[in-house]
Image (tube, rainbow, N blue to C red):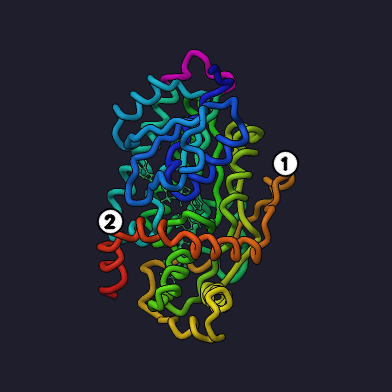
Amino acid sequence: MTFRSTILITGGAGFIGSHVVRFFVNKYPDYRIVNLDALTYAGNLENLRDIENKANYVFVRADISVEKEVFDVFEKHKPDGIIHLAAESHVDRSISNPTEFIYTNIIGTVNLLNAARMLWKDQPGGKRFYHISTDEVYGSLGDTGIFTETTPYDPKSPYSASKASSDHLVRAYHHTFGLPVVISNCSNNYGPNQFPEKLLPLFIHNIRQNKPLPVYGKGENVRDWLYVVDHARAIDLIYHRGKDGETYNIGGNNEWKNIDLIRLLCKLMNEKLRRHPGTSEKLITYVKDRAGHDLRYAIDSSKLQNELGWSPSVTFEEGLSLTIDWYLANQNWLDHVTSGDYQKYYENQYLKR
Ligand code: NAD
Ligand code: DAU
């Protein structure tokens, strides 16, 4: 079978990446989707069982921080486009072990940029390097204000500093070498298949097991939540219609103070698990704050809405309910990803606080 285009998606076995891979494989049967992933603790091919046998899907295990592995994949598959999601993504891990973030998020991105530059040097037309980034590169807001595409970068954690560095490098390759790049910076995603080290899946898992809910500090930090499939829809639009060299912010316009979100989650979990009102709330436990904890993120996504016509398709009530139902119905998935190494990380992160 011949395909119209080959797209290399990095990090496709992870949380957001698996939703993006599924979206593209199903929507574009005439694209060949190559999923490159190292399968770290966060990568799980079970996320893609429903599409793994499709004719337009290929999985390749490779580590983007190893130049030769990246060049070999480019040599073999000759992608026309790259959607780059592979990263170390958890802020707390970046505080306990920053170096891994430098290798994957910075060196890994440079390896991909170099490989794309080499492959496309004679035929740059119709090619695209799409780098997926985060709102955390803009730093932290006070009680007011909002991040736009021109907000100066001010990353505060090793994770966000490594993402900021990769964003700068992607822009530098556009400016210096004319590489056809586009970048988006998104707010907090939630939904099925998120590794239970992040707030929502961790707390759903703990409520179900009657374990404490470790709220950092006073729970006053604010995040802007977006359903993961709406991020995948935005990525589709930006990949196809975004302008070279441009940046697009993606967000849910859906700010929640952590403690308010956690109380809402407790209420919904009580209802879904048929527990008495107030039962899950008793698990709330205030613990030592995250070092350098960013107070508030809020994203202005009006450029994406006005120029490309995107808007979220799922309300927060629907998305949260779908998400809880998914984790409750997929205990096997949770059991698999919470065994082994993750258990050790969990003990270090929480049981020593
Ligand atoms: P994740 O941690 O769930 O998945 C990351 C994936 O990358 C995993 O499959 C992992 O195996 C793979 N990976 C890690 N190191 C690799 C390496 N060296 N080589 C190849 N593969 C490697 O992450 P996520 O939450 O899905 O985030 C995906 C991307 O989106 C990241 O770039 C992140 O910065 C960005 N982002 C995430 C959010 C969010 O709320 N989760 C919001 C905005 C942007
Ligand atoms: O804003 C986008 C970013 O969102 C992405 O770039 C990151 O990859 C992603 O991990 C996420 O970062 P956060 O640090 O905001 O997400 P996390 O789920 O770790 O935490 C959300 C909030 O909840 C944050 O204020 C810290 C707090 N928290 C988190 C955990 C895991 C707790 O209070 N207790 C916890 O146990």
Residue 214 pos. (x, y %): 40, 75
> Element under label 2?
loop
Residue 32 shows in this picture:
yes
Crowding at dot 1, Cα within 10 Å, few <14 / some 14-19 / many 20+, comes out as few
Image position, residue 12 (x, y; %): 45, 41
Q: Quadrant of the C terminus?
A: bottom left
Q: Check residue 318 for magenta coloring.
A: no
Badge 2 amino acid: Asn
Magenta extent: 118-126
Of marks 1 and 2, which one's residue comes earlier in the chain?
A: 2
255 over 232 or under it: above or below: below
Mark number displayed over residue 338: none
**Residue occupied by mark 1:** 307
- Does the magenta stretch mainly form a helix, a strand or a loop? loop
Query: Is ligand 1 less than 8 Å from the beta carbon at label 2?
Result: no
Q: Mark 2 points at which residue?
A: 97
